[in-house]
Amino acid sequence: MIKVTSDAANKLIKKLEQDKSILVDKISKMSTFVVAVTENYDQIKAEQEAEFNLNEVIAKIDEIDEKIITIRHAKSTFNNSTVMKNGLTVGDNIVRLAILEREKGIYSGLATRQKKKRNTSLNKDIEYTYLNYDLEDAKKKYDSVYAEISETQEELNIVNSSAEYKFEIDIDL
């Protein structure tokens, strides 16, 4: 049984992914070998087989994948059962942040426009583009979304770095 925070679980997953990448690279590099016509094929093959066993490497990759699945499942369970101060689960807040970031971009664009802007065209008449909304409302909405993002992200950071959950795994830390 292991007890970790979400931050620690993320680091553990990253480490396991790196270990897996090393093994995949090993398969790529050691799955073939070259023998010159003047060399003894059987001797070189025996040396290569002593250094590389495909089935062992695949078994290690499978073990790593199982550990990653275990950690991700525990993290998913934690994210979908841990309720934050705003009444949403960690998982819902992660989705909410993505929505808020998109909204922030929209309101940022609306809040930074000019109330009246001269158009450049080949027409002999001078034309202006006017806003069809209250610029202050757009700025207030941007500020509100920005504040909600900041608050949510701050609380997520606290939860991810302090709240712990347990799961069964055989791993060296």
Image: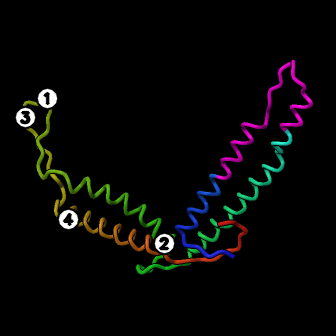
Say above or below: 155 vs 138.
below
Say which of 65 and 96 sits in front.
65
Question: Which residues lie in the magenta part?
Answer: 19-48
Q: Amino acid at mark 2?
A: Ser
Q: Nearer the viewer, mark 1 or mark 4?
A: 4
The mark nearer the N terminus, 2 or 4, is 4
Q: CA distance from mark 1 to mark 2?
A: 59 Å
Gap between marks 1 and 4 measured at Cα: 34 Å
User: Residue 35, relative to residue 51: is it above or below?
Assistant: above
> Label 3 neighbourhood size at 10 Å, few (<14), some (14-19), many (20+)?
few
The residue where tag 3 is placed is 125
| Residue 20 in magenta stretch | yes
Residue at figure coordinates x 81%, y 43% from the top left: 52
Give me the C-alpha separation between circle 2 and circle 3.
61 Å
Image spot of residue 48 (x, y percent): 83, 37
Q: Earlier in the sequence, mark 2 or mark 3?
A: 3
Choose mark 1 or mark 2, whichever is in front. 2
